[in-house]
């Protein structure tokens, strides 16, 4: 018997899959979205059932920043199962799956790139593709758009923490705007590439980066790297794929003088073909870059989209 009676709508299928495969944070987030209940209302329901939980804690649970490990927290999850209308013990059993203390829930590459994407086989060939030893705490991305409206350069600065030993490499993947013209990794700082694969036809570059110094569990490090786009084709969006929760993310987009877009907004996707969620207008001005800052980013796809006059 299936764990969850799958409704016909895509949201129901996604939830059923998450309840079967995890991680807990994704299943909880989808269940909350499908219920239509806000965190404040869930807090009230839990309090009425005698298991008070703050909205901040609920937010951390759904983004994967923390997990309900204490006995009273597990009791709250059991109440949530009833309130959210998911099968009894479906969320509890996801929490019971073995894992490494302090490591985040990881979603599969298939969810972020699509199950038929040709990049998946190359990603899986990297030893560190499923690494959990480095947790990204903070991610700052600076994207520059040229006067011809094409993406020009992407500079990334990450703060990472070692949560397992031995500390492995970090795999980063970037796709160009059109097939046949993959971006180039042009510089690194505080880290070094140990392997880079270029997929010309789909337009991908994948690089494995290792910190410049050895790290013990609990230590933090800064990683910086920069890509150059090579296609020269006008584009209207950029996104980042998150496999695990990240405490904070800043994306700033610098448009060349005289090429400001007419509109700009930030968005989130659960899957590449899914609908845009959490759509937020982003102001554009010649005096400062367009930017979007968010805390408590859960697994998924976060990006910015703009339109030209």
Image (tube, grey):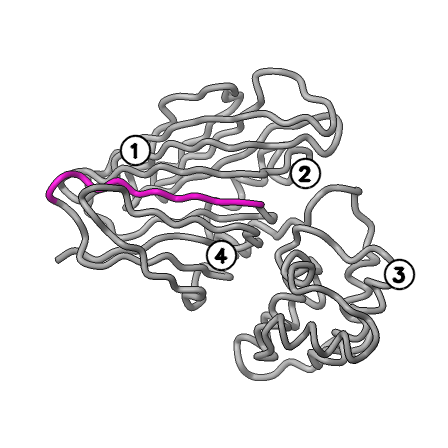
Residue at image position (58%, 38%) is: 136
Q: CA distance from mark 3 to mark 4?
A: 37 Å
Q: Nearer the viewer, mark 3 or mark 4?
A: 3
Q: Is residue 200 left or right of residue 42?
A: left
Instruction: Please say if 70 is above or below 171.
Output: below
Of labels 1 and 2, earlier in sequence is 2
Is 251 included in the stretch rendered in magenta? yes
Q: CA distance from mark 3 to mark 1?
A: 48 Å
| Residue identifier under label 3 | 71
Q: CA distance from mark 4 to mark 2?
A: 21 Å
Of labels 4 and 2, earlier in sequence is 4
> Residue 65: x percent and y percent?
66, 50
Query: Which residues fall within the magenta stretch?
Result: 247-258
| Residue identifier under label 4 | 114
| Residue identifier under label 2 | 132
Classify 10 Å Cα crowding around label 2: few (below 14), some (14-19), many (20 and above): many
Farthest residue in the top direction? 213
Numbered badge on residue 153: 1
Residue at image position (68%, 46%) is: 104
């Amino acid at each position: 018997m299936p764990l969850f009676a799958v409704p016909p709508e895509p949201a129901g299928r996604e939830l059923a899959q998450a309840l079967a495969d995890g991680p807990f944070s994704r299943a909880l987030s989808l269940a909350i979205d499908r219920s239509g209940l806000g965190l404040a209302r869930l807090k009230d329901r839990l309090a009425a059932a005698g298991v008070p939980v703050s909205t901040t804690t609920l937010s951390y649970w759904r983004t994967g920043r923390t997990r309900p490990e204490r006995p009273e927290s597990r009791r709250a999850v059991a109440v949530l199962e009833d309130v959210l209308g998911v099968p009894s013990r479906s969320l509890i059993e996801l929490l019971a799956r073995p894992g490494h203390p302090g490591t985040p829930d990881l979603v599969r590459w298939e969810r972020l790139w699509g199950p038929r994407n040709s990049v998946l086989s190359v990603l899986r060939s990297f030893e560190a593709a499923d690494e959990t030893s480095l947790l990204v705490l903070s991610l700052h991305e600076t994207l520059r758009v040229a006067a011809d409206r094409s993406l020009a350069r992407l500079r990334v600065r990450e703060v990472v923490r070692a949560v397992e030993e031995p500390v492995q490499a970090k795999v980063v993947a970037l796709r160009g705007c059109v097939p046949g013209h993959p971006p180039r990794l042009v510089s690194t700082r505080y880290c070094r590439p140990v392997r880079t694969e270029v997929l010309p036809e789909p337009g991908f570059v994948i690089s494995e980066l290792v910190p410049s110094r050895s790290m013990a569990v609990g230590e933090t490090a800064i990683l910086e790297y920069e890509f150059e786009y090579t296609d020269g084709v006008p584009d209207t969006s950029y996104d980042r794929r998150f496999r695990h929760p990240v405490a904070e993310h800043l994306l700033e987009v610098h448009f060349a003088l005289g090429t400001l877009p007419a509109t700009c907004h930030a968005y989130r996707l659960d899957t590449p073909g899914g609908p845009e969620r959490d759509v937020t207008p982003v102001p554009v001005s010649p005096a400062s870059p367009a930017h979007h800052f968010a805390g408590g980013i859960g697994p998924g796809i976060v990006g910015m989209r703009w339109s030209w006059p």
